[in-house]
Amino acid sequence: MIKKMFLSLMMALMCLTASAQFEAGKKYVNASMTSLGLGYNKNNGFMFGLNATGGYFIARDWMLLGRFGYNHPANQINELEIGVGGRYYIEQNGLSLGLALSYGHNSDHGIKGNHGYLTPEVGYTFFLNQYVTIEPAVYYKMCFDDFANCSTVGLRIGVGFYF
């Protein structure tokens, strides 16, 4: 009985601490690994990537994001990506819903290409303390100009900092 009460109290305190981080005016930075070998598209096969993200809460639970990324598919065509987006946090359960627009450019081994992407994602925010989080997310990066071959489904895991 005491064990259950203690666990309930700890969960309530974690929720109170987390909700304070989603207020208007808060800032956010994140470094994440994209795909972890789990991202896949028909054209490139499996891939690995790194992302840096910065954000600003414009209202409670609503954040605007800027993102810069590097993707390395199995076929050795490296891609640099820049984008903007938004995220909504569902405080009751730690889930977040995101949507981003981005532009990717690659130019390796004589192959050049530019792609536009729309990327919806569903993530979870797990607070380690008042500021630091671990944030896994599942995403689907839809390619505008070659949907069938360049669209990617994958897993992203990152470490975030709210201040």
Image (tube, rainbow, N blue to C red):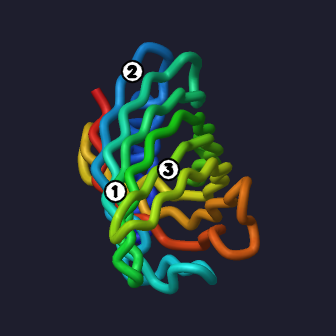
Q: How far apart are marks 2 and 1 (CA)?
A: 26 Å
Q: Which mark is residue 104?
A: 3
Find the distance from the CA under tag 2 to the CA under tag 3: 28 Å
Query: In percent of the image, x 54 and y 44: which residue is there?
Result: 103
Position of 53 with respect to 102 (left or right) is left
10 Å neighbourhood of mark 3: few (<14), some, or many (≥20)?
Answer: many
Q: Which amino acid does label 2 sit on?
A: Lys
Q: Can residue 88 be seen in this view?
A: yes
| Residue 3 rendering spot, x and y as whole percentages | 36, 71
Q: Is residue 2 above or below residue 44?
A: above
User: What x and y, as percent, mark residue 97?
Assistant: 64, 48
Residue 105 lies left or right of residue 132; in this view the side is: right
Q: Name the amino acid, label 1.
A: Tyr
| Residue 159 marker | none
Q: In this view, does 20 lie above or below 112?
A: above
Dot 2: within a 10 Å radius of its alpha carbon, few (fewer than 14), some, or many (20 or more) residues? some
Q: What element carries label 3?
A: strand
Which residue type does callout 3 highlight? Answer: Gly
In primary-sequence order, the first of circles 2 and 1 is 2
**Tag 2–tag 1 contact (CB < 8 Å):** no
> Which residue corresponds to mark 1?
70
Q: Residue at x 43, y 48 (%)?
A: 81
> Is disc 2 placed on a helix, strand or loop?
loop
Q: Name the residue under label 2.
A: 26
